């Protein structure tokens, strides 16, 4: 890259080392969640949501379990204003939910915001102004003292109007572009705002530290958060909040490390929708906690319904590889992955495991409304015996011998490769029947009679090349006798090396399936399966198919 020298670091480390967060290895409790889908997420849409869509989305967020929901920037547009009034006037806000509104630290915008939020049962009024070096110098052309005064005046006006306006209000302040602000200066501004608000244990306020633009590795953000948390005035009465964006692809990591560093609250969106590369993805963040045994206090047990509703309201599409929510995230195409998953699932059944440790699956898909048959094993040209065997067993009740699973795996890989597509479970089942079940050419057995005399004697009527032949031989069992008769009559050379059977259905008219494997003189294996209500007939059909597969090879 020829222009690398034009870039430089635009972040600031704290003036003292702040690395206590490193000593913690996981987030041990969920933060306070605030969804900003209806403001940040809506702002980032090519076509913003209609009033009706926003109302329905609000109801979805309530159903998921959000107790704080930012509903818009009411001074910014008529739709935002009308949406807020609709929620208040139609009593759509549950008693345990607090709405949040955003305003710049500008007098006329703050006043219009309070007009819009009048009568709210509980509302957070979130005021912000930008504090970064780049914004101070290039956009506002103001000194540190002037920028601080904007924040203080905005905070004071919030306090004044809250006393004069009907409703129940809490306050939030954000030094926007916090990550590009000197930590000492950001602390000075926040403390000045807190001196205005004088928070108490009964009337806490929120200081929100946004990663408005990610410009550093996540550990830098964590160190900045720890510095602010340790040095902020009234800390016991302040809810320290984070609002991570995702410019470097580190939104979730910023949030997790920020919680370790002292944050109490997270603002984000479902599936990470937001300006530019988006906000922190709350679905991922919450389910990361869930996968570590931490209750996230959000309900994603019907993920498919949430995804469908989100896409319907926003017009956005959830990527197939999006963590937890994507269509393919619980799908395994790799043969080794499929084999490990299948064995892990079987191990769980056999050992009644109380904890989830299945290889390659960080959580149980059924916990979020997904299903193994559709989601875990997917078959294409990269797949192997484990996945194919698992699908046949789980969907169709076929428990193939290990070596036969391998042969079926190769057959499925070959079919997928030639068709250039993924195989669905029914297609795999049809392929199994085509390759391994009741194949009747070139040999076809039409009748078999047995009698017992020094063992079992089989009299087998065989069609071969348009002629019927009766073959007779003895054996130590019915299948062995049939096999010996065919070998003797047609000079076939093979050894019967595998036999396995099981019931297919549990009823008075249940059918059985038999699997037979034979080996030729070069140690090549050939397989057959037979299905019939009579297990003897099923085993004969399996042997016949294995012989025909050998002859047709």
Image (cartoon, helix red, strand yellow):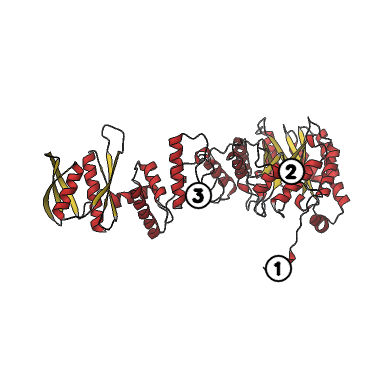
Badge 2 marks a residue whose secondary structure is helix
Determine whether, in the image, residue 84 is placed left or right of residue 456: right
Compared to residue 39, the image places residue 136 above or below, namely below
x and y, in percent, of residue 319 in the image: 55, 51
x and y, in percent, of residue 516 in the image: 27, 47
Q: CA distance from mark 3 to mark 2?
A: 38 Å
User: Which one is nearer the viewer's eye here, 119 or 96?
Assistant: 96
Q: CA distance from mark 3 to mark 1?
A: 38 Å
- Per the image, the residue denoted by label 1 is 3
Determine whether, in the image, residue 446 is placed left or right of residue 404: left
Point out which mark residue 20 bears. 2
Residues at discs 1 and 2 in contact (Cβ within 8 Å)? no
- Per the image, the residue denoted by label 3 is 328
Compared to residue 211, the image places residue 206 above or below, namely above
Question: Of callouts 1 and 2, which one flags the residue occurring earlier in the amino acid sequence?
Answer: 1
- Whether residue 173 is visible here, answered yes or no, is no
Question: Of callouts 3 and 2, which one flags the residue occurring earlier in the amino acid sequence?
Answer: 2
Determine whether, in the image, residue 472 is placed left or right of residue 165: left
x and y, in percent, of residue 83 in the image: 67, 41
User: Which one is nearer the viewer's eye here, 125 or 263?
Assistant: 263
Report which quarter residue 324 is drawn in.
top right
Q: Residues within 10 Å of mark 3 (few under 14, many from 20)?
A: some
Badge 3 marks a residue whose secondary structure is loop
Question: Of callouts 3 and 1, which one flags the residue occurring earlier in the amino acid sequence?
Answer: 1
- Whether residue 293 is visible here, answered yes or no, is yes
Which mark is in front, 3 or 2? 2
Residues at discs 3 and 2 in contact (Cβ within 8 Å)? no
Q: Residues within 10 Å of mark 2 (few under 14, many from 20)?
A: few
Which mark is in front, 1 or 2? 2
């Amino acid at each position: 890259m020829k222009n690398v020298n034009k870039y430089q670091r635009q972040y600031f480390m704290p003036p003292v080392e702040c690395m206590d967060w490193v000593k913690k290895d996981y987030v041990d409790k969920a933060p306070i969640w605030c969804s900003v889908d209806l403001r940040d997420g809506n702002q980032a849409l090519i076509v913003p949501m209609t009033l009706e869509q926003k109302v329905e989305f609000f109801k979805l967020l309530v159903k998921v379990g959000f107790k704080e929901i930012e509903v818009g920037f009411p001074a910014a547009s008529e739709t935002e204003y009308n949406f807020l009034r609709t929620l208040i006037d139609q009593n759509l806000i549950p008693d345990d939910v607090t709405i949040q509104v955003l305003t710049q630290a500008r007098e006329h915008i703050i006043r219009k915001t309070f007009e819009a939020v009048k009568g709210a049962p509980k509302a957070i009024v979130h005021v912000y102004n930008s504090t970064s070096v780049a914004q101070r110098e290039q956009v506002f052309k103001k000194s540190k003292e002037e920028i601080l005064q904007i924040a203080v005046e905005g905070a004071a006006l919030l306090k004044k109007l809250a006393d004069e306006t009907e409703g129940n209000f809490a306050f939030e302040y954000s030094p926007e572009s916090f990550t590009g602000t000197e930590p000492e200066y950001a602390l000075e501004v926040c403390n000045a705002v807190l001196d205005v608000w004088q928070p108490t244990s009964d009337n806490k306020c929120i200081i929100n530290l946004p990663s408005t633009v990610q410009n550093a590795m996540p550990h830098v953000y964590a160190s900045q958060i720890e510095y602010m948390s340790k040095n902020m005035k009234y800390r016991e009465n302040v809810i320290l909040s984070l609002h991570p964006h995702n410019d470097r692809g580190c939104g979730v990591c910023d949030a997790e490390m920020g919680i370790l560093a002292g944050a109490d609250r997270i603002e984000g969106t479902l599936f990470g929708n937001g300006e530019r590369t988006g906000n922190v993805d709350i679905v991922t963040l919450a389910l990361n906690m869930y996968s570590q045994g931490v209750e996230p206090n959000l309900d994603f047990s019907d993920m498919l319904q949430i995804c469908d509703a989100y896409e319907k309201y926003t017009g956005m599409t959830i990527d197939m590889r999006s963590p937890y929510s994507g269509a393919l995230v619980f799908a395994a195409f790799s043969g080794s992955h499929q084999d490990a998953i299948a064995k892990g699932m079987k191990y769980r059944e056999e050992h009644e495991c109380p904890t989830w440790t299945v290889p390659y699956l960080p959580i149980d898909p059924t916990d979020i409304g997904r299903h193994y048959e559709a989601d875990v094993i997917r078959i294409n040209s990269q797949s192997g015996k484990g996945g194919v065997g698992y699908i046949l067993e789980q969907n169709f009740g076929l428990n193939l011998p290990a070596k036969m699973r391998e042969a079926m795996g190769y057959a499925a890989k070959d079919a997928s490769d030639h068709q250039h597509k993924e195989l669905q479970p029914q297609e795999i089942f049809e392929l199994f029947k085509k390759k391994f079940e009741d194949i009747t050419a070139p040999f076809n057995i039409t009748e078999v009679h047995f009698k017992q005399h020094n063992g079992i004697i089989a009299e087998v009527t065989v069609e071969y090349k348009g002629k019927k032949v009766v073959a007779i031989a003895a054996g130590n069992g019915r299948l062995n006798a049939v096999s010996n008769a065919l070998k003797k009559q047609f000079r076939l050379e093979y050894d019967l090396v595998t036999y396995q059977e099981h019931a297919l259905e549990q009823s008075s008219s249940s059918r059985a399936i038999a699997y037979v494997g034979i080996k030729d003189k070069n140690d090549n294996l050939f397989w057959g399966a037979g299905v019939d209500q009579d297990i003897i007939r099923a085993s004969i059909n399996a042997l016949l198919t294995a012989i025909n597969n050998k002859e047709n090879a």
